[in-house]
Amino acid sequence: MTTPDGHGGGTAGFPAADPFSSAGAFPLPSTLSHAVTGARYWLPPQAALAPSAAPAPPPVAFDVEAVRREFPQLHREVNGRPLVWLDNGATTLKPRQVTEAVGEHYARDTSNVHRGAHALARQATQVYEEGREEAAKLLRTRDTGEVVFVRGTTEAVNLVAQSWGRANLGVGDEILVSTAEHHSNLVPWQLIAAERRARVVPIPLLPDGRLDQDAYRDLLGNKTRLVALTHASNTLGTVPPVAEMTALAHRWGARVLVDGAQAVCHFPVDVTELDADFYAFSGHKVFAPTGIGVLYGKREVLEAMPPWQGGGNMIDSVSFGRTSYAPLPHRLEAGTGHIAGVAGLRAALRYLGSLDREAATAYEERLTAYATRALSAVPGIRLLGTAPGKIGVLTFLVAGADPMELAGLLDRQGIAVRAGHHCAQPALAAYGVTSAVRASLAVYNTAREVDALASALYEAVGV
Ligand code: PMP
């Protein structure tokens, strides 16, 4: 079996040598060539679409095998085949530093934080607050008071909707939500809009999965209170021009919430540069445990928000007559947090920080371009979302094949992908479909694994 790039042979379609071992050997499709400039979210859409006349950037050295060694799960078999994990959009695998940090917390260092007068409480508190510092560093804010621990992106958006939304939305106000959003950046807005008699208004998509900027400009107005935007779509891979869209929203006095769930592990993020009012991500999509995530908010915005949940940790003093609240970020963190989760998040973000992020992003961009070319050549395939600068999310349909059955077929070859609506039904509806297969890449994936996927798809269509 030979893939479109001529990397054939070997069991399960693995080429003898990983073509990425000689960086620069890949001619990129012209529509994707800009993606390696590293300037993805500042590019105006038209410029991004034009085939680049610039010379190819120098090859970037990136040792993917060294990265793979840190992820034990990559070395197991599934259904008798080497695992090919292409379900990173659902969750990423964990490097051993993370599993060790979580294991050590429970095996040796268990303690609650902030309230103990003993050594282990102090130690746990230190780890917890260092985890917060790592998250602040990741998002490039200096103020750890702006970093609120939550369960994940879903809880972050619900916190903003229920606290900021209840305090700031009124009858007839509008919340603009992009059609590319995950349900977790749509349904919380529908809930609070129903309560406050506000309106949720969709920002439409262009056929390639970009957000329609002309429509967006027209939708903004003096009723707009908030814009909810993904920083990278989990279904289409689109990376909208968030900084530009935020600047436009601010001209109308609207706040902007950015869902960074799929962004933080793929490219560096700077909330100050984006000027986002809120930014959310989930730990488990950036090599950390499930159940821990971050809501970033500008200090002045968070300060003005009423507490969402009440309880321990979030108070200053309590009496039946009057209760006052702790300073940020604790005011928004009622109850015992996910302490082991933060230990894991600290380890994950330190691990991510130890990588050359520029080289890692460039590697992923090349792998995405490679995968796009490889899959595009499969007979009967339809890729949903082909926006320039997209992340490595390849959502597709194959003519005559049911997405679930296709995913089952891949699973039998040890290839993990997701099939279904991807919690983004409006995005799929824009393409007239209700279900699709999604292969999502991470920094530890290889061209070999993409070849395995392409091979299996060729087999599925009987070529
Ligand atoms: N937003 C995006 C873009 C996502 O991909 C996901 C998870 N698939 C979420 C939000 C929700 O994240 P979580 O379930 O971790 O809260």
Image (cartoon, helix red, strand yellow):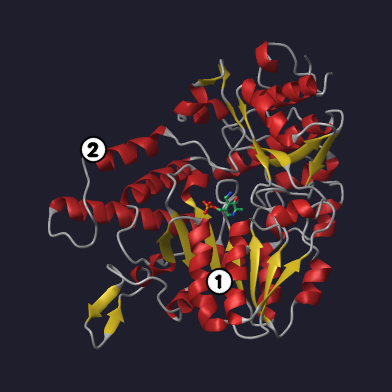
Residue type highlighted by circle 1: Asp
Residue toward you, 349 or 330: 330
Q: Where is residue 375 in the image (x, y as percent from the top left)?
A: 78, 32
Q: In which quarter of the image is the C terminus?
A: top right
Q: In which quarter of the image is the N terminus?
A: top right
Q: Mark 1 points at which residue?
A: 277
Residue type highlighted by circle 2: Ala
Disc 2: residue Cβ within 8 A of ligand 1's nearest atom: no
Residue 198, compared with residue 443, is above or below; it is: below
Q: Distance between the residues labelled 1 and 2?
A: 39 Å
Q: Mark 2 points at which residue?
A: 107
Tell me: 462 left or right of 113: right
Residue toward you, 170 or 13: 170
Quadrant housing residue 451:
top right
Tell me: 197 left or right of 67: right
Q: Position of residue 194 (x, y in %)?
A: 61, 75
Q: Position of residue 44 (x, y in %)?
A: 78, 61
Residue toward you, 333 or 410: 410
- Mark 2 falls on what kind of element? helix
